[in-house]
Image: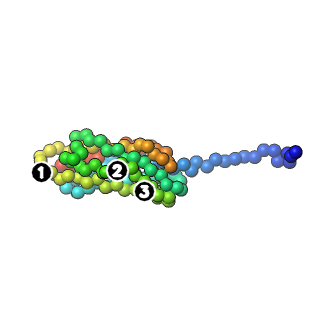
Amino acid sequence: GATLGAVTKTVVTIVEDDSAIEFGTSNYSVNESAGYITITLVRKGSTAGSATVDLNISSGSATAGKDFVKPDSPTVTFADGESTKTIQIQLIDDVFKEADETFYLSLSNATGAKLGSYLYGNVKILAND
């Protein structure tokens, strides 16, 4: 048998060290002739260990295959120690006269991290016709 010594209480502090993945900004704007748009994802908090998140791209007035090229894999992987990732989405510069167009971004299915505050974004393609 053991007996308690003089110290019978202690204080434990839990440090919030979870990481969260989110968009660097929620509104992007790019000229149609730019060739591509760079989307930035940020991993806040701890960067220990790897983490993944799915980047979902949905057509709006801008349509996949006509106005931009949807990436093959929606999964973005952060290696141990990485705090930012950039994804380039190719734009299609057509010759049609059209107004500015928009497509939408969202994040889901995070592993090794939680989803952050900025889970949704939009990309406005500025017409050059």
* Residue 117 horizontal/vertical position (percent): 45, 43
Q: Which residue is found at the position 36% from the left and 48% from the top?
A: 74
**Comparing marks 1 and 2, which lies closer to the viewer?**
2
In space, the residues marked 3 and 2 are separated at their CA atoms by: 18 Å
Where is mark 1, residue-wise? Answer: 95
- How far apart are the alpha carbons under marks 1 and 2? 28 Å
Q: Disc 3 residue type?
A: Thr
Residue in the foreground of this view, choosing between 69 and 33: 69
Of the image marks 1 and 3, the number of the one nearer the N terminus: 3
Total numbered circles: 3
Considering the numbered disc 1 on the image, is that residue within a helix, a strand or a loop? loop
Asked where in the image residue 101 lies, by quadrant, the reply is top left
Q: Secondary structure at mark 3?
A: strand
Left/right placement of residue 126 relative to residue 16 reads: left
Which mark is on residue 73? 2
- The residue that disc 3 covers is 84
Image-based side of 127 in relation to 78, left or right: left
